Image: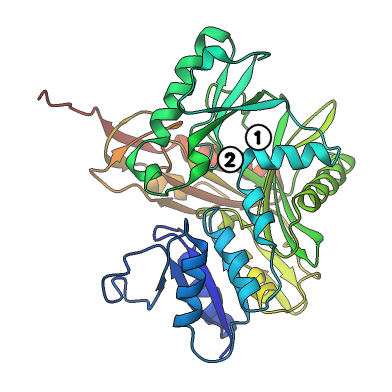
Amino acid sequence: MTRVLLLATTTGYQIRSFGEAAEALGVRLVFVSDRCDRLEDPWWDKAIPVRFHDSAASVDAVVKAWQGPPPSGVIAVGDRPTVLAAHLSAAFGLPGNPPSSAEASRNKLASRLAFASAGLLTPACQTISTGRDPSTLHDVEYPVVVKPLALSGSRGVMRVDEERALGSAVDRVRRLLRSPDVAVQRDGLHDHVLIESFISGREYAIEAVLTGGALQALAIFDKPDPLDGPFFEETIYVTPSRAESGVQRAIVDTVASAARALGLRHGPVHAECRVNARGVYVLEVAARPIGGLCSRALRLDGPGRRGAPLEEVLLRHAIGEPVDGYRLSPGASGVMMIPIPRRGIYRDVAGVGEARAVPGIEEVRITARPDSRLVPLPEGRSYLGFIFARGQTASDVEQALRSAHGRLQFVIEREVTLAE
């Protein structure tokens, strides 16, 4: 049986989607994950335990655990596994990205420097160590955006409009980087904070695959809600894009140039960019697919196949099948990542049935668990859930998502802090 290594953290949403796609294709997934290596298969999926912060030891662990013919492909889900995926592709002689390129793609400063060297539009930026006083910085032109070097999902990202607010923003990022769930990653990139010029404009996301360095765009998502700060919580993604055809071509061409600048060669790509009167600013090019459950908003048609999920197309690509014939299915689709409105304890939600009854809505998935603690951005890392819609046009889909969200009523109780 064809086998593919799938690298993911233990909490990855997309594991089940890849599992369903693999079963349909007759592919066996072999999981590689950062879980306890002292327990006997604690998750009952025969995953190979690794540590993403230690690539050399993790490659040895996977190679020693592997039995039989080499895998047919390697896929990483999430930013942290991408570097180990590159090392494993090299170890097994498979197409993949150079490890140094994978490293650069998840390092916001290294990405900015690579894009600037390639002549791409890039915001002015500088870094500060988490132990340095921000008041010692010079030549800061406001507004700026303060962000960690290696966290995703807009976590820790804040806009600062004046000098007196910079110190508190850097302190806030510093506290986040020292929190237990981040510190456990043992990532040296968390020792610094990036400060870069704020870029105005409309924001887009691009889903693509690289084959031998050639980029094939699968979808351009509009982000219709303005992302101007003070925080940058993403909500609605809608495709196909309503941008003019010339703007769409410029987006794809610039993302392809950015991928080349990083040295990425093979595998999935999720990119983010902003477009204004000056042109296209690439914010990131990640060597992984879109995160969370958002991939469910995509359906792709290929030779002899209609309505394929993204995970199926990526698995086909990983095992060497051509996917250049795949295009978005007719119509429009989209997803809303339901934002957390405030900190507190989640108790319940009403109106789910009414939201599902909105024309065009395919699914309403509440992922927050009752009695769980909710933390909004910039410290938070999750959503209340996801709403999926399909329709004739992107405008129809956007309206359906907003209408469904308006029918949901979340019960969030205030946290009670006990005095010591």
Q: Is residue 3 above or below residue 414?
A: below
Residue 410 versus residue 167: which sits nearer the camera? 167
Residue 50 versus residue 415: which sits nearer the camera? 50
Q: Which residue is at a point 32% across and 69% down the rendered structure image?
A: 37
Question: In this rendering, does residue 213 appear at all?
Answer: yes
Q: Which residue is at a point 36% across and 64% down the rendered structure image?
A: 35
Residue 141 appears in which quarter of the rendering? Answer: top right
Residue 89 appears in which quarter of the rendering? Answer: bottom right
Disc 2 secondary structure class: strand
Question: In this rendering, does residue 283 appear at all?
Answer: no
Q: Is residue 344 left or right of residue 161?
A: left
Disc 1 secondary structure class: loop
Pointer 1 residue = 224
Q: Are marks 2 and 1 in contact (CB under 8 Å)?
A: yes
Q: Local crowd at mark 1 within 10 Å, few (<14), some, or many (≥20)?
A: some
- Residue 192: image tag: none
Q: Is residue 315 left or right of residue 118?
A: left
Q: Amino acid at mark 2?
A: Ile
Q: Which residue is at a point 73% across and 54% down the rendered structure image?
A: 219
Give the image location of residue 175, x and y in percent: 38, 29
Give the image location of residue 110, x and y in percent: 67, 41
Give the image location of residue 176, x and y in percent: 40, 33
Give the image location of residue 387, x and y in percent: 50, 48
Residue 118 versus residue 25: which sits nearer the camera? 118
Mark earlier in primary sequence (2, 1):
1
Q: Is residue 110 left or right of residue 254?
A: left
Q: Local crowd at mark 2 within 10 Å, few (<14), some, or many (≥20)?
A: many
Q: Amino acid at mark 1?
A: Pro
- Residue 236: image tag: 2
